[in-house]
Image (spheres, helix red, strand yellow):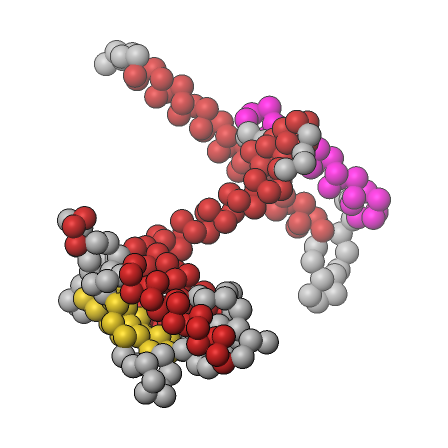
Amino acid sequence: MADEEENKMEQDDEMEALESMYPDDFERFSKDGDGSRPTFKIALLPTEPADEEVNHVGCELRVECPPDYPSDSPPVFTILPLEKLTEKQCATLLGVANEAAEENVGAPAVFMVIEAVREWLMENNEDPGDGSAFSEMMRRQRESQRADAEAAAAAAAAVEEAREGMTEEEEAAARRKAAGTACTDETFHAWNTAFMAEMALKFENEGRVGVKVNKPEGEKDPEAYVGVCLVFSVCLCVCVHARAYLSICTSFYLRGGTTGG
C-alpha cells in the first residue's frame, strides 16, 4: 500500500501529463499547498473542430483525486453536459467513467477514462432532436438498430467461437443442420407417409383402431385426433401442389404463352 506522499506524486505527474496532452481543454481547480484535493476538468467532444463534423454531444469531465488514489481507490467523477447531451446520457457516461476507473485501480486511470468517455461520445454523436414525439421515435429507432447490430455481432462471435476446434465434417454437418431440409413434393410425401404409418401403428398397438367407445368427459377421442391429422396432411398436399401449379403458370406467362379466346 503506497503512502499519501507517493500517491500525491503520481497525481501531480498525471495532471501534468494530461495538461500537456489537452492544453486547450484542461483546467485545474486546486492549487498546490492549499490543502484541497487535486481537482481538474477536461472538456471532451466526439471529434476535433477541425474535422468539420458536427458535435451533437459533449461533456465536461470533472475529476477529484482522493488521498489513496491511485494505489487503492479510483478518482471521483462528475459529468456535466456540453452541446445537446441529455441528463440521461450524463448518467450513462458517469457509469462508463466509473467502470473504466474500477478496471484500472492501482495505476493512474484518468487517461483510460477519457478514452472510454470519448469513444462513447463518438458512438452516440447524434442529434437528440427537439423533444417532439417524432424525434423521440427516431431516437428509439436508432437505439433499437444499434442494439440489434450488437446482438447480431455477439451471435456471430459466439458461432465463430463454437466453430473453433471443429473438423471439416463437423462444420459441414452443423451448416446442414442450420439450413434444414427443403420442402419439396418428394420430401413432404416421404414425411407424410412415415407420419401416417407411425400414427396407425400407435393406435393399432393401443387396440383402438375401428373401436368406438364412450369416453369419460374431458378425454380426447383418438379417432378424432387421427381425423385432424388426415385433414392437416391433405391441406399440406394441396398447398404443395398449388405452389407447383402456380410456378408452372408463372413460367408459362413469362415466356409469353397465351391461350385462344
Picture coordinates of residue 182 (x, y %)?
A: 55, 29
Q: Quadrant of the C terminus?
A: top left
Picture coordinates of residue 40 (x, y %)?
A: 30, 75
Residue at 50% in and 30% down = 240
For the record, the magenta segment spans: 184-208
Residue at 57% in and 42% down = 159
**Does residue 194 show up magenta in the picture?**
yes
**Does residue 30 show up magenta in the picture?**
no
Residue at 33% in and 64% down = 18
Q: Quadrant of residue 248?
A: top left
Q: Quadrant of the N terminus?
A: bottom right
Picture coordinates of residue 202 (x, y %)?
A: 79, 44
Q: Is residue 90 left or right of residue 213?
A: left
Question: Camera-side residue: 12 or 205?
Answer: 12
Q: Quadrant of residue 247?
A: top left
Q: Which SS does the magenta portion mostly show? A: helix
Residue at 54% in and 36% down = 236
Question: Camera-side residue: 241 or 158?
Answer: 158
In this view, which residue lies farthest toward the bottom?
35
Picture coordinates of residue 168 (x, y %)?
A: 66, 27
Question: Camera-side residue: 211 or 22?
Answer: 22
Question: Camera-side residue: 132 or 116?
Answer: 116
Q: Is residue 80 left or right of residue 215?
A: left
Q: Is residue 173 left or right of residue 138?
A: right
Residue 120 appears anywhere in the view:
no
* Residue 143 higher or lower than 67, as above or below: above
* Residue 61 higher or lower than 161, as above or below: below
Number of marks present in the image shown: 0
* Residue 181 higher or lower than 228, as above or below: above
Q: Quadrant of residue 116?
A: bottom left
Residue 64 appears anywhere in the view:
yes
